Amino acid sequence: MERRADADERTVAAVRADGAHRPPVAGSMPRRGLPGAAPAAAERATPEGFRAEPGAGERVPGGPGAGSPPVSALGALLATRSESGSTGMRSRILLGLVCAGYSVGAAFGWGSPQVAVFMGDFGLAAAALVAAVSCFLYARAGAGRLRPAWLLFSLSSLMAACGNAVWGWYEVILGVPVPTPSLADVFFLCFAPPAIVGLLVLAKRPVTRAGWVCLALDAWLIGGSLLTLAWSLALAHTAHMAGVQDASVAPAALSLAYPLLDIVLVSMVLALHFRRAGVNRSAVNTAIAALALTVLSDAVFTSPLLRSTYHSGQLLDAGWFAGSLLLAYAPWGARRGARRPARPGPPRATASRPIAGSLAALTPYLAAAVCTLGILYNVVDGRRVDRVVIFTGCTVVLALVVRQGIMLLDNISLTQELAQKENHFRSLVQGSSDVIMIAAPNGTLRYVSPAAAGVYGREAETLVGAELSSIIHPDDLGRVVHEVRRFLAAPPHEEPTTRIECRFRSGTGDWLNVESTVNRHQGGLLLNSRDVTERVRLQAQLQHNAEHDPLTDLPNRALFTARVRQALGGRRASDPGTAVLFIDLDGFKQVNDTIGHQAGDELLIQAGRRLQDSVRAGDTAARLGGDEFAALIMGDGTRDQGAREYQVHEIADRLRLTLSQPYRIGASEVRVAASIGVAFAEPAISPTDLMRNADLAMYRAKAGGKDRVELYAPQMQADVVRRSELATRLRTALRDGEFALLHQPVVHLASGSVAAVAAQARWRSAQGILFTPAEFLRVSGDDDRTAELGRWLLEEAVAQAADRARAGHPVAVSVRLSAARLLDAAPPPGSIEALLTRHGLPSGALMIEVADSDPRVSFDALEQRLVALRRLGVRIALDGFGSGFAAINALRRLPIDVLKLDRNLVEGVVESARLHKITSGLLRIACDLGLQSVADGVDVPEQVLALRAMGCTHGQGMAFSGPLDEYRLRRALVRGEFPVPGIPSPRPVLAGGSIPLLTGSHTETPVPPT
């Protein structure tokens, strides 16, 4: 920002009040101290004016502009707007308005010479100070690797601000011309070096030594050519006039230092414009533009036509002012742009890179052309060519030759490297197991790698020229075309590649599963394809295994649930005819236990095959696990729900009959039955609920006698809830003392005396409801809880029997235990002996009733256990004799003392002649074996008479007494005997000896419904 002091004479003269002026000096000088050339400038000065002496100071080129972030008045405003998130357009508009306002003021002289001089001096100083503070704050806030550059820009702008301030001090405050040299010259000379170093920091650093050499050569080519041209046009004349007018070295040096520093700065700006670092590119571009604008203003000022008439406050000052504000705006505007979300689409810089690369390549030749123009100017003008021009031109040509040599060597190296890489990639392409194909925009294959012969079974030459669509499976073509169109329409930077899987035709005519990675290539496609047929087959097999039962190959629970969900959510969602069948094979466990698990697996395979063959094509048969199967019967749109239920019931019954047919396994024939539960779809029902309903119906079928079909009813869910609540309460019943022990007398049929008492557990819940063992053990479903209850029953019965014996009522007690419980969970013999010893009960006073109906129990283990108990003196009774499958075998092998007839035999012994004969025969067997017999469930006197006539020794039932609590039991034992029908007794019948709730008799007392 050179400004001539001689051009300011008119303005300063108007400001000076005393009218004094200094004698004019030949030539004029810029604020930097560059002496002007025209003596006529002194003649044009008014009497009040003055002519500045050479070196009187000058404004730095770009004095008010070499930074980037804003601070101070404008800078704080821009920073505040950036912080508040205002758009970049507002900041640019504000910046443009401020610069335009300054330009308009300068164009109209600011209204008065005093204001013009003030704005020309302190206005530029303020703008440069804004740039300095802005760059400093941005560097302090954290500019990363570029922080030193912004600090240098801040220092450069500060030098320009100080120079302009000193200049204004002389012109405005003191009203005197600026001396030459002055402190302003020092500040202006210090403007360019920090800016030059800052530009070097901003540049993209070369990687190699050759790169550094080329950077230096490029800078010299630009600087030397500009020096040649500038020397030819003006600097030679300036140097000559400085030497003629003043023999002092300082003015002459100052007159050349400023333009030379400008040339260096312009050279760096041009050379580094094509080597910008990729970091914060917007800020770097703005800073370079600010410095370029400052240097351009200096170049305009150096023209002889302008410098002779220039004075402070003219329009040229607007260029320096705008340069300073643009440098102040640079970093903050860039930061705001970086915070904005990236817009979709390719970056804008992509389109300008080829142009920028071309300009960078042409820069050395353009510099040489400018140098040639400088020499031609001297030749055409008829002047002798200056030695400076010759020397500079020769060095420029030499630099160009050296640079071209370096570039030639670099090109040779790059060509060799490119050829090596090309051979390397050609080997990779030709040796790759993947097929690489290039398709033209019209879909024609232009290149196919040799791997096609091994992958597709087709030679690459036969595929070149063919349409890509001709080798794709017709069923996959539409999907492939849609994916390719979507991929080509997407922005490349968002989706550079895509993956497509389809089927290609092989040379044998088969279809191969091919996976292709697709890239864009010159408007067409580049496909990298590989054969994934085996992988697809393996995935399909894994998927099949994950969704099908490995034994029967039927759909498993996961796939069946998915099919049910699809049926409930598809177009038949509103069809109430859709039904789910749950099927359980009755007796399958016996098959596993008797003939082995391998035979059981074969039975399941045959059952699954029968089920699959019995359902319709659109229905689904599945195995859920174990011996549980399921079937999904799709609705047919029938609106008559009754007819649909009848139809599905017929299908389920047909399945039951089919699954109940004999199975041929090896040389044997096996039979099982099927219990089937059916549940129909309801509006808004979930697959889980529908399958649960079918499961509940299936369990109801099993509980109702098995081998039957049961339709789901809402009451089933309520029953499940009730049983679940009951089972939950049962878990805490023992701990809370809710169980009670009752005893039912066993009466001698001949005399009516009490021979023993049978211990029975009852659960009196917190609600006052009395539950029998059959009720609460059936709903508990907890074997551990059942075992715990058995241990409690045994210990409590022994303890109470011992107490009664000590009270003078020594009567035996019988405890019923199942054979499985006796083996698995009951205490070992030593524990029973310890129990009897601890309570002081003779071993003969305890009798164990063993149930014989469980076929899973090993008779050998049971026999050993009972023999051990028998050695202790514990008596053994066979409970439920006549109802089990192994009664005769148990009677033959086990150490039995008492036979206890099943109540089903006793109930019909009077009415049924057949049962009368069976019961009579069983009693005869017991008599022949020397065993005592007990009839269970003797409820009426006729049964007492009939059983006694058959030879039965003891009876238990309502004909004598129901289960009694301890108080009523002891009252009965005090009486000693009960009246027996057919035998006169002087004593009255025992009253009040049973619980009022009882209506029948057995070891399980009936309870009212809950």
Image (cartoon, grey):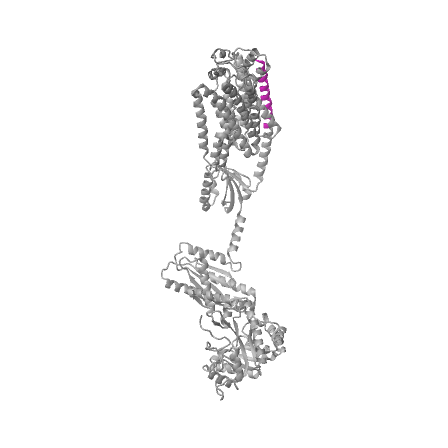
Q: Residue 400 or 549: which is nearer the viewer?
A: 400
Query: Where does residue 838 sit, x and y in percent of width and height?
Result: 62, 75
Q: How many labels, in total?
A: 0
Tell me the chief SS of the magenta region. helix
Residue farthest left in this picture = 640
Magenta-span inclusion, residue 756: no
Q: Is residue 951 above or below residue 322?
A: below
Quadrant for the C terminus in the image: bottom left
Residue 768 x %, y %: 47, 71
From this view, report whether residue 783 is shown above or below residue 40: below
Q: Residue furthest front?
A: 18
Q: Is residue 804 above or below residue 425?
A: below
Nearer to me, 846 or 558: 846
Decide if residue 11 is in sight here: yes
Q: Nearer the viewer, residue 422 or 472?
A: 422
Q: Which residues are magenta?
A: 386-411
Q: Residue 977, percent across and down?
A: 52, 84
Residue placed most toward the observer, 533 or 316: 316
x, y percentage for residue 407?
59, 26
Residue 390 lies within the magenta run: yes
Residue 362 visible in the snapshot: no
- The residue shown at (57%, 42%) is 433
